[in-house]
Image (cartoon, coloured by chain):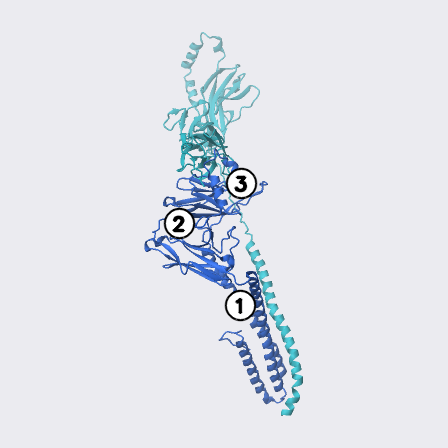
Amino acid sequence: MAMEGKCFGCIATPILVIMISISRAWTMQQQHLSPAIQQHPAVKSLSHLVDGNDNLLPMVSAPSSIDNDYVYIASVNRKFPQFGNSIDDEREAEEQPPEETTYPPPVFDFGMPRNITTRTGHTAAINCRVDNLGDKSVSWIRKRDLHILTAGILTYTSDERFKVVRTADSKDWTLHVKYAQPRDSGIYECQVNTEPKISMAFRLNVIVTPPDAKAIIAGPTDLYVKVGSSVTLTCHVKQPATSAQDIGPIYWYRGPYILTPFVAHPNDAAIDLQRISMESTLAEKLQSRLRIANAQLLDTGNYTCMPTTAEAASVVVNVINDESPAAMQKSRAIRTSGSMRSSRLVLLLAMVASSVVRWLIGGQRIGSNSCHDSCSNLSTLHINYCNLRAKITSHLKEHRCLGPGSTVES
Amino acid sequence: QRVEVPAEVIVDPKFSSPIVNMTAPVGRDAFLTCVVQDLGPYKVAWLRVDTQTILTIQNHVITKNQRIGIANSEHKTWTMRIKDIKESDKGWYMCQINTDPMKSQMGYLDVVVPPDILDYPTSTDMVVREGSNVTLKCAATGSPEPTITWRRESGVPIELATGEEVMSIEGTDLVIPNVRRHHMGAYLCIASNGVPPSVSKRITLVVHFPPMITVQNQLIGAVEGKGVTLDCESEAYPKSINYWTRERGEIVPPGGKYSANVTEIGGYRNSMRLHINPLTQAEFGSYRCVAKNSLGDTDGTIKLYRIPPNAVNYVENFEARHKGKKRTKSSESHHPARAQEHSGEDMENPGKRKADLSLGAESIDSIYGNSAAGSRRRQDLGGVLLLLLPVAVAVAMSLATAGVMRETQMTLPPQTLTHV
């Protein structure tokens, strides 16, 4: 009987330790998953940001190539322009000649904002995103009078305030309305020339804002920070109560480029979106905060806070170099990954070693008691077994493997 | 960077004339023409107003609809062509010039469709019983909606319910109450909507009725040794079987001195003739002409009596002798009265039909069950693997720990003895 008791104790304890370890690991995994899920709604809300547009800031000059292209296309000097041939030439440049393949049908990205609000005199940007465009083309028309605005990358309307900007992958077709006027408010349709056509309608609201509505960035207008430090820009929007109904999103720009973590701009490869975060409060208090972690030399620039319904504000951020930026960046990455791995291994080894040591101590005591052959020692053996179990419980608690109210059951 | 151009050089374009609306049948090509004056550097575009679709811009076809084409003459006449037009192409089209503000005008394309008679619910050939009511139906499609006209074939007039007769009547339904045998024939349903060709459908109306017999001469006298012809007329549809019998019911045998034939007079009318030559004493008596078809049978009676041969030799005294015989033999005057016509009874044989509708039960394929079983098996395998892993690890750990414990036991006993 005594020997059987010893054997049971030998087998039971290791099983318990292993089971507890497995459950602990499982719990940690679950905890790791939940933050990702929680971030998903944030992704949705942030995806409503509109893609950036050029020539937005009067103080900054836009890339000249775009302007020249636009003027050339819309030039009234040309006589009898070969409109059809132009489209054909552009298509040949865009992609290889079609080999009579069957294209998958184009699909709209329904995540684009369908209700755009802008202020009088500013440029409105309506983004239409199409996947699987294939051999089709995208056109913009104004629903009010069926006026054709653009077809492909060419502008049809004589109103030179309208133009379309296309991304390199031919997915984003953004209609720009410069110097927007209240009469430009209405429904605009992005149309793909499938048979029958597919289209998506957008509503543009051009509002007149009072002159005292403006944005203010806290702090000095010239900011100097060291390389590696973090920068926080806070933008407050002052606005009369009468125009609170037309509140729109608050955008951040660095120079002519919009800063958004979720829409990659092809001309903007220099922006390290992983180090930039934004949060906006559009309740009673209109406020937006831009954070730049681990500032680098390339973060130097003119930062602009652009509310939808108020005047913009800008500050200049200057990043000063004290160390070599490349070495610092690499060393930090290595440190982070190394520390994570080593901490996990240390934790695992500690748990295993502790359990083995505790078990050896308990085993000795049981061995010493087994020398008594008299029947009266049976009760003593039982008491020692209870004591052993209590020690195991306290050991597990020290390593936080159990909750405060749980106990080990034999 | 805009280049300034003198205002006098560019004239504002305008439309020289409105777009002429067009009407065309399905399958043809349609053309809408937009005439522009002083176009200059501006561009002309065509749109479909109903669907707000861009069709063409200048000389370029934007839509992927292969049936759309564009042509222009000296940048003045911009003609949009739609090949093989369909009914869905009907609607308004806009011609647009990209001036600021934009100028536009619209034209309408009307697509007409020739008439076509629908197989349902248009009536097919009908077989009805005389006396019943009949409604012939005719339905047709087309654009504009076609007009239905009924006529009878070969110029036969249509008898209306009021008894009036007309050559044609309009309407999708032609109602003939209390159908008679003369209504039998072919009717034409004609659909027309002004777009050629008009179409027609022929519907045959068949009227069934039991036989009827008419006897013009019920009493015939003949001289023995000469020949004689008995004549009956019958009407029946479906066509009847006709034959002759004597007063006792025996059928007159064909051949010999008897010869019988049936001649069709009209659609449902026949003439029966029995020729007897020569006459002997045995042939005198009563004869019956009988007609039978699936709806019934009827007969007529003809009395054949003997005239003395000497009456024929004295033509001059024929009348006097005939009159004299009548006066002297008063008993014979009652004999002709016995010869009366027996009208046949109408026998109706209604056809009995039993329509057995049997519905076979369809077995439902249990795909869902199969897929569920498959998924369950996979889950079980996964579960077993998950359970086995910790057990294996536990066994290994317990074996290692047991080894350590044995060493401990061997070292402890001597110390214990000393303590006691």
Chain for colour blue: A
Q: How many marks?
A: 3
| Callout 2 amino acid | Thr
Against B110, residue A388 (above or below) is below
Task: Give the CA separation, mark 3 to mark 1.
Answer: 55 Å
Task: Give the CA separation, mark 2 to mark 3.
Answer: 32 Å
Verify CB contact (< 8 Å) between mark 2 and mark 3. no
Chain identifier of the residue bearing label 3 in the image? A
Q: Measured from the top left, where is residue A1 in percent x and y? A: 62, 83
Residue at numbered disc 2 = A118
Quarter in which the N terminus of chain B is drawn = top left
Does label 2 lie on the same chain as label 1? yes
Chain for colour cyan: B
Mark drawn on residue A28 = 1
| Callout 3 amino acid | Glu
Disc 2: CA contacts within 10 A as few (<14), some (14-19) or many (>=20): many
